[in-house]
């Protein structure tokens, strides 16, 4: 279940924050901090830190952060550094 929630988080975050950019990630980091259970509704908080897309995921019904410290670096941004 963790990898399903990670994929959902990353793809949804990138679609919402920057719909016109490629989904070709050079680097991906996420810390699972609580389990996601079937039926959980998830909310994703998204922001940019430099060229990276940062995010964390909440399960509001349980008042729980289920992943934190999420960061995705796009391949194009990574190749310019």
Image (cartoon, rainbow, N blue to C red):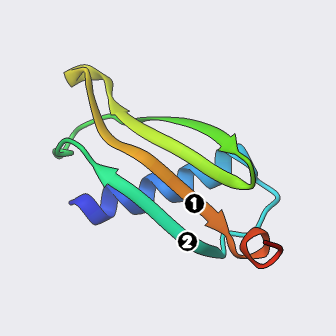
Assign the N terminus to one quadrant of the image. Answer: bottom left
Assign the C terminus to one quadrant of the image. Answer: bottom right
Q: CA distance from mark 1 to mark 2?
A: 6 Å
Q: Residue at x 78, y 74 (%)?
A: 76
**Sequence-wise, which precedes: disc 1 or disc 2?**
2
- Local packing at callout 2 (Cα closer than 10 Å; few below 14, some 14-19, many 20+) is few
View extreme (front): residue: 81
Q: Residue at x 83, y 74 (%)?
A: 80
Comparing 9 with 80, the one in front is 80
Q: Residue at x 35, y 32 (%)?
A: 58
Q: Where is residue 62 drawn, in percent x and y?
A: 20, 23
Question: Is residue 80 found left or right of 49 in the rendered image?
Answer: right
Comparing 16 with 67, the one in front is 67
Asked which quadrant contains residue 56, the reply is top left
Question: Is residue 38 found left or right of 59 in the rendered image?
Answer: left
Residues tagged 1 and 2 counted as in contact (Cβ below 8 A): yes
Give the residue at mark 2. 27
Give the residue at mark 1. 72
Q: Secondary structure at mark 1?
A: strand
- Local packing at callout 1 (Cα closer than 10 Å; few below 14, some 14-19, many 20+) is many
Comparing 80 with 72, the one in front is 80
Instruction: Say which mark, if any, is on residue 26.
Output: none
């Amino acid at each position: 279940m963790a990898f399903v929630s990670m994929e959902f988080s990353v793809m949804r975050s990138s679609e919402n924050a920057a719909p016109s950019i490629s989904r070709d990630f050079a680097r991906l980091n996420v810390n699972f901090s609580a389990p996601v259970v079937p039926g959980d509704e998830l909310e994703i908080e998204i922001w940019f830190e430099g060229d990276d897309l940062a995010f964390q995921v909440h399960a509001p019904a349980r008042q729980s952060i289920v992943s934190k410290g999420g960061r995705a670096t796009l391949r194009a941004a990574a190749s310019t550094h």
